[in-house]
Amino acid sequence: MAEVIRMPRMSDTMTEGVIVEWHKKVGDKIKPGDLLAEVETDKATMELESYWDGTLLFIGVEKGKSVPVDGVMAVIGKDGEDYKTVLDQSKSAAPVPDKKNESAEPPKNQSGEEKGKEKGAVAAEPVTMQAETETKVEKDENGRIKASPLAKKLAQEKGIDISKVNGSGDGGRIVKKDIDTFVPATGSAPKEAAKPGAQKSVMPFAQTGQESFTDVQLTQMRKTIARRLSESNFTAPHFFLTMEINMDNAIVSRNGINDISPVKISFNDLVIKACAMALRQHPAVNASWMGDFIRQNNHIHIGSAIALPEGLIVPVIRFADQKSLSQIAADAKDLYDKARNKKIQPQDFTGNTFTVSNLGMMEIEEFTAIINPPDSAILAVGRIKETVIKKGDGFAVSNVMKVTLSCDHRSVDGAVGAAFLQTVKRFLENPVTMLV
């Protein structure tokens, strides 16, 4: 019996996924563990592996298009099996139409010309850094330019004449990368995209003296960041507590620990450990607002925010209070590598009870962060900075770090947040207390 492959829910907030790439084509033999496709979710681009054995009989979603959770992606079964019967029996046999992701290729008339041209639509002016004779465009047996649907869509939105783009895909096929890296010739720009409302693209002001802009299409991750943090900012009454921490002892202790640790310990690892231990003493901060009650979590899972080109993601270090500094450092490194290499799984970025956001490595001295739901607090960490302090009868240079705690006033009161910060400060100013 053929198996219908549906879009899995890869995160708790995921509603749809976008097919970034199919790694198998219809007719390919599939076995368990084979990589079927790459799927962009609201959190990251993730790999979808097969749990089935058979032949790929049907692909229901083109590359670059979205499909809702539980929507049909493909069918795997025996070679030659009638998969249409299986699809007909499925309640969700066809993917939900996504008008935003419809093919960018315009309709053709009998002569093969674009109907938009018949109606007087303005075609994109050819734009290229190369002479037209140097552009090699591969065409299929029907005389159409070989390009992926996503590449066609992006070219039309950007007003690029796709016939002037060199393809780097198989057989000279034009792919998304070719559109993204396409550079117009100096002094030449597309007049108008053929599709109404499409992005207009011109050369930067520094080169031509013209105004310009670039419309960046939203990724699933960016959409979710915008929605969730907007909800957090406007529904959770934030208040902020800032404290200065002397990091002299932390610097000395970290150097000594790294002399014997199997994994390099970062200052962020020290902060995560300090927060985890402080949360054990202040359970009211390790909480979530649930509408008509407050949930105080008995477990401590620390989210550590990192920036990716697609947006922000928060890998979660579980039971951080029960782990040594070297274990926290190893877990953090593994999670960060997974996130950057698009190997991260839902269990790696869900379940946080508190979050740390550190911009110290980017020379930021102090900032405030928006609470990461379902947490009731997030700690924003700035850089360690040398400053002159009063010491005895004179002055001395000391290393200080500013941290700001953002709290949800519905579940955390000011005095509770302040007491939590005092405990974090004690741990970081005397790191040996975290080792006993």
Image (cartoon, helix red, strand yellow):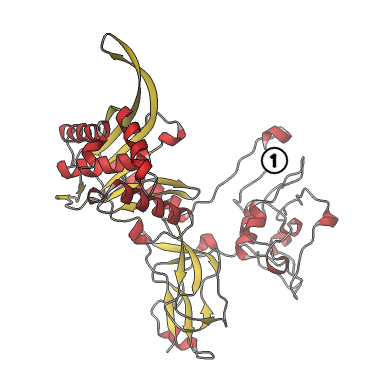
Quarter of the view holding residue 161? bottom right
Q: Which residue is mark 1?
A: 203
Q: Which amino acid type is marked by label 1?
A: Met
210 to 374, vertically: above or below: above
In x, y percent, where is residue 421?
A: 22, 33
The residue nearer to you, when weighing 226 against 99, is 226
Residue found at the very far right of the displayed protein: 133
Quarter of the view holding residue 271? top left
Q: Looking at the rendering, in which quadrant would you find the N terminus? A: bottom left
| Camera sees residue 35 | yes
In x, y percent, where is residue 228?
A: 35, 49
The residue nearer to you, when weighing 258 against 373, is 258
For image coordinates 68% across by 42% down, the residue present is 202
In x, y percent, where is residue 351?
A: 28, 55
Q: Looking at the rendering, in which quadrant would you find the C terminus? A: top left
The residue nearer to you, when weighing 415 against 278, is 278
Residue found at the very far top of the displayed protein: 393
423 to 111, vertically: above or below: above
Crowding at mark 1 (Cα within 10 Å: few <14, some 14-19, many 20+): many
Quarter of the view holding residue 208? top right
| Camera sees residue 369 | no
368 to 277, vertically: above or below: above
The reply, left or right, for residue 37 in relation to residue 121 is left
The residue nearer to you, when weighing 15 against 80, is 80
In x, y percent, where is residue 398?
A: 34, 22
Total numbered badges shown on the rendered structure: 1
Q: Secondary structure at mark 1?
A: loop
The reply, left or right, for residue 46 in relation to residue 250 is right
